[in-house]
Image (cartoon, rainbow, N blue to C red):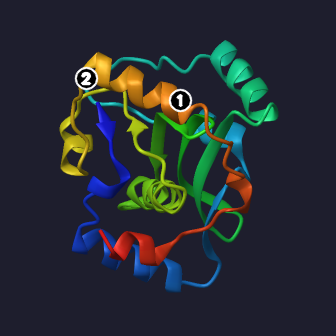
Amino acid sequence: MVLEPKAFRFHRSLQQSLKKQLQMPGVRLCFDQAFVQVMQRCADSPRQRQSGTWIVPRMIEVYTELHQMGLAHSAELWQDDRLMAGLYFVSLGHAVFGESMFTSVRDGSKMALSLLVSTCLRHKIPVIDCQQNTAHLASLGAHEISRCQFLHIISQAQRKSAIPWPEQHLYWDELLNL
């Protein structure tokens, strides 16, 4: 399951939620301000039809090491000093692998995903690996591709230079041009 950034469904309701949130004082979207906290919040978020989490403490340790190496990142929605939503992902060159997301506000994880998608559009990243085929991801434009297609896209993408994720911001125009 992959999401081609150009196929992201930036629904009108999401646009309105995002505009409303960003007009509030102290609200910001950013990368890599609280990577470990994002992972922990993802681990703590209840999932339908799942007992427990696959994000165990050892996994958080290993992904934190990847983050320190510049390979794992987080996209975050903040209200002042409170983390409202986020997602974390691995990035190898232009190959992006989404891992998990959480939110404590309506549409928050979609807003964090919008930040990731707008940056992917800006840098011509071909796909975001979503791993799981879920109705939620499909509603946002994700779809399945063959393993052969996936491997070809990823092998090309990982050869490109790394994105300086912490320096990126929401590229609103990129989203509006979808």
Near-viewer residue (30 or 163): 163
Residue at 33 percent across and 46 percent down: it is 4
Badge 2: residue crowd in 10 Å (few <14, some 14–19, many ≥20): few
Residue name at image x 48 percent, y 54 percent: 124
Task: Please give the name of the residue rendered at 73% of the width and 61% of the height, measured from the top-left corner.
Answer: 167
Secondary structure under tag 2 reads loop
Which corner quadrant holds the N terminus?
top left
Q: Amino acid at mark 1?
A: Ala
Q: Is residue 73 left or right of residue 15?
A: right
User: Is residue 160 or residue 54 the one in the foreground?
Assistant: 160
- The image quadrant of residue 117 is bottom left
Amino acid at pointer 2:
Arg
Residue 60 percent location from the top left of the image: 67, 23
Give the quadrant of the C terminus.
Answer: bottom left
Res. 77 image quadrant: bottom right
Question: Crowdedness of circle 1 by 10 Å Cα count: few (<14), some, many (20+)?
Answer: many
Q: Is residue 165 left or right of residue 53?
A: right
**Where is 125 relative to 134, above or below?**
below
x, y percent for residue 97: 49, 32
SS for dot 1 = helix
Where is residue 56, by image quadrant?
top right
Q: Residue at x 25, y 59 (%)?
A: 9
Question: Mark 2 highlights which residue?
Answer: 49
In the picture as drawn, the residue positioned furthest to the top comes out as 58
Q: Count the marks: how many? A: 2
Q: Is residue 176 visible?
A: yes
Q: Residue 83: x percent and y percent?
A: 62, 56
How far apart are labels 2 and 1 at the CA level? 15 Å
Q: Which residue is mark 1?
A: 43
